[in-house]
Image (cartoon, helix red, strand yellow):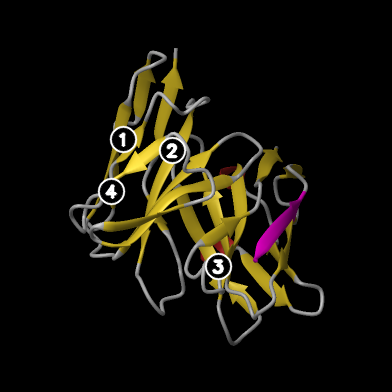
Amino acid sequence: AQSVTQLGSHVSVSEGALVLLRCNYSSSVPPYLFWYVQYPNQGLQLLLKYTTGATLVKGINGFEAEFKKSETSFHLTKPSAHMSDAAEYFCAVRGMTTDSWGKLQFGAGTQVVVTP
Amino acid sequence: DGGITQSPKYLFRKEGQNVTLSCEQNLNHDAMYWYRQDPGQGLRLIYYSQIVNDFQKGDIAEGYSVSREKKESFPLTVTSAQKNPTAFYLCASSMKGLGTGELFFGEGSRLTVL
C-alpha cells in the first residue's frame, strides 16, 4: 500500500526566506504524487502534481517540487516566502493497487507560519 | 463556474442526533469522496463512490452512511453511532478511470456536537 510521511508538523520561516517542506513516500510502483494547500476553514487546493516525465515540477504561487526516486522523496520548495504562504500543506500519493486505485493517501500535514 | 458546493458550512448537533451534510458538484466527475479532517491527522477517507448507485467504505466508515442517487450529489449522514463526530468534513471529486487522480475539493463543513 502507498503512504506518505511529512517531516515536521510545524515550520516557521521568515518572509523572503526559502520554504522547504519535506515529504517521503512509500510505494511499490511508480507513484503519482501531489501537494495541496489549505487555508483556514477552507478546502484543499492543488499546488502541483507529479505523474510521469520531468522530475522537477512547477506549480502555482511560485512553488516547485522535485521527485527523487532514489530517495523516495517529493519535497516542496519556494525560493522566497510571502506572508500569504501561511497555510497548511499536505503531501499525497495516489493508490496504484487494485483495491486502492484512484484514492489519495494524505500525509498528516505541515503548518507553515511566516514571520515578518 | 464549475466546482463543488458543500452545505452547511457550520453545523451544530446535539448528541444522539443524525445530521446530513450536502455535497453537489457540476464538474461532470464520476468519482466523489468524503474525508474527515482532525488536527494533526491529515485527511482520512470515509466513503467514496465511482459511479451512481455504488459506493465503498473508506478507512473510517463506521458511524457514517452515504448515498449516490445522482451523479452530481453525494450526501453524507453522520449517525448517532459515530462516537466522536466533531470534525471538519471535506467532499471531493475526480475523474474516474485512467486520470491522474487529482481531487477537487469543496470548502468543507464543520460539525460540532454539543
User: Dot 2, how many residues are within 10 Å of its Cα: few (below 14), some (14-19), or many (20+)?
Assistant: many
The residue labelled by disc 3 is: A94
Q: The residue marked by circle 3 belongs to what chain?
A: A
Q: Residue furthest bottom?
A: A53
Return the mark for residue B21.
Answer: 1
- Residue A2 drawn in magenta: yes
Disc 2 is placed on an element classified as strand
Q: Amino acid at mark 2?
A: Tyr
Q: Amino acid at mark 3?
A: Arg
Considering depth in this image, is B58 or A93 the residue closer to the camera? B58
Q: Is residue A44 above or below residue B113?
A: below
Considering depth in this image, is A20 or B80 the residue closer to the camera? B80
**A15 relative to B4 in the view: left or right:** right
How far across and how far down the image is residue A74, in percent? 70, 68
The residue labelled by disc 2 is: B89
Disc 3 is placed on an element classified as strand
